[in-house]
Amino acid sequence: MWLTIQTDDVYGRLTQPEVAALQSKVLGPNQTDPIGDTIIECLTEVRGYVGNAPRNLPMAAGLAIPSELKAAALSLIVVRAASRLPTKLMLTESRTESAREAIALLGRVADAKFAVARPSADQLDKIESVGAVYPAYDSTRRRAFRNQFGV
């Protein structure tokens, strides 16, 4: 099954003071919550690793990722969001190590050494063709026949 990660998924991995710090200290005037942008960046990166292995194609539409990679994606999102804070209190050694392990797992996915589920038919990315459709053959009539050449 493929899924997308929401802001609530990320906040579920953080303590309430950490959520408050991300929502207040990171924001300047006129800035919105940066977690949404961090989620998009990390999901795009995860999809890049998944798409590198031909057996993982076709991929699901949008920013969906395989459910097996949810924990890895969340680890990356938390570390990258925490790195935006002026103090590095959220960047604990265990979180940094978890992010390293996530990158290693994604590398195995890209090398087709870790299998991920295929998306269901209703999750597939709909590819639309563009441009004119040309026939794969020429339909002109033959003007010469073998018997004309003595064969």
Image (cartoon, grey):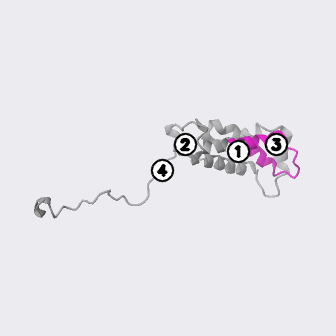
Task: Give me the C-alpha separation between circle 3 and circle 4.
Answer: 38 Å
Q: Which residue is mark 2?
A: 56
- Give the amino acid type for the residue marked by disc 2 in the picture: Asn
In the image, taking residue 110 as reference, residue 132 lies left or right, namely left
Residue with the mark numbered 1? 103
Q: Residues within 10 Å of mark 4 (few under 14, many from 20)?
A: few
Q: Residue at x 63, y 36 (%)?
A: 67
* Amino acid type at image mark 4: Ile
Amino acid type assigned to the residue bearing label 1 in the image: Ile
Q: Residue at x 82, y 42 (%)?
A: 19
Q: Amino acid at mark 3?
A: Val
Q: Nearer the viewer, residue 148 or 78?
A: 148
Secondary structure under tag 3 reads helix
Q: Residues within 10 Å of mark 3 (few under 14, many from 20)?
A: some
Q: How far from the left and from the top, in percent, is residue 149?
A: 13, 63
Label 2 to label 3: alpha-carbon separation: 34 Å
